[in-house]
Amino acid sequence: MNTTQDNKPWPAGYRIHPRAAGPDAETVAAFREMPVAAIGDAMSRNIGTVGLRQYHARLDAVLCGPAVTVRVRPGDNLMIHKALMMVEPGDVLVIDGGGDVSQALVGGLIRTTCVAKRLGGLVIDGAIRDLCEWAEEGMPIFAKAHTHRGPSKDGPGEVNIPVSCAGLVVMPGDLVVGDADGVIAVPASEAAAVLVKTRAHLVREARIRETNRTGTADPERFDAVLRDKGLPI
């Protein structure tokens, strides 16, 4: 049975676990320069959020940092407030709101806290409000939708547990990267290896881009695939 620090059982529906350490600062900084699409290509092209949009105004803004995860009851943000007491500068808050968009989970007041805490950004499978404030520079945020209707603060909820956010499984401490193309999570234990693969992929893309630009692309790149499928090429 999971228990609290004083060895009492958690109330049903509540868990608060310590912050998980993510990748080292050098690895995080390196991923900040990697396009999410290239990271996704290095991770089999089937990992990442689906159905979220960015609400910060600058298309070139990058979200990058270790995940602090939160699962909430749809429309309730009690545990988001608790998680914000636990974050460290650069952390990314990943919130599983069950995809519910009937009530906003965060708004302008929480944004003020995020900026003061120097959060790396937020990823929310749910709704937000106070769009004009989120559009200002300084706090990347991806969410499913927006509404003027505010949240309750009653719980239950959980902090630093495995979550599913818009189709993306995120563990506490995973490296979360988001840009104009979308959001992806890299397991902390695999970050160094994925970084190597991503860099190699970008080198390959650069070669392909140059052959596309000069019209010297090898037709066998695709003809061989078509022949293998039985086409008379």
Image (tube, rainbow, N blue to C red):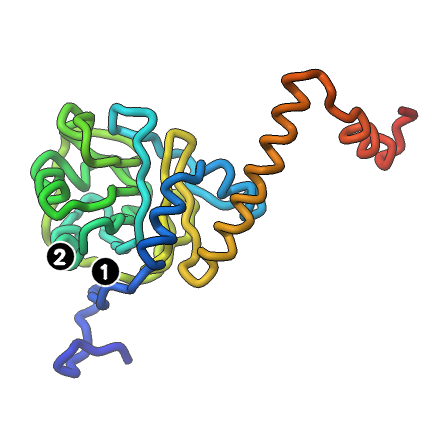
Circles 2 and 1: CB atoms closer than 8 Å: yes
Q: Secondary structure at mark 2?
A: helix
Nearer to us in this view, 2 or 185? 185
Q: Which mark is residue 159?
A: 1
Nearer to us in this view, 8 or 188? 188
Where is residue 225, by image quadrant? top right
Q: Is residue 232 left or right of residue 167?
A: right
Query: Is 97 rendered above or below residue 128?
Result: below
Quadrant location, the N terminus: bottom left
Provide residue 17's location: percent of width, then percent of height: 23, 67
Residue at figure coordinates x 61%, y 25% from the top left: 209
As shown in the figure, which amino acid type bears the numbered disc 2? Lys
Query: Is 75 rendered above or below residue 85?
Result: above
* Residue behind mark 2: 82
As shown in the figure, which amino acid type bears the numbered disc 1? Val
Q: Is residue 22 left or right of residue 193?
A: left
Question: Could you tell me how far apart the alpha carbons at marks 2 and 1 are, in whole angstroms?
Answer: 8 Å
Residue at figure coordinates x 38%, y 53% from the top left: 27
Residue at figure coordinates x 36%, y 48% from the top left: 176
Badge 2, how many Cα within 10 Å: few under 14, some, many 20+? Answer: some
Q: Is residue 115 left or right of residue 48?
A: left
Where is residue 200, by image quadrant? top right
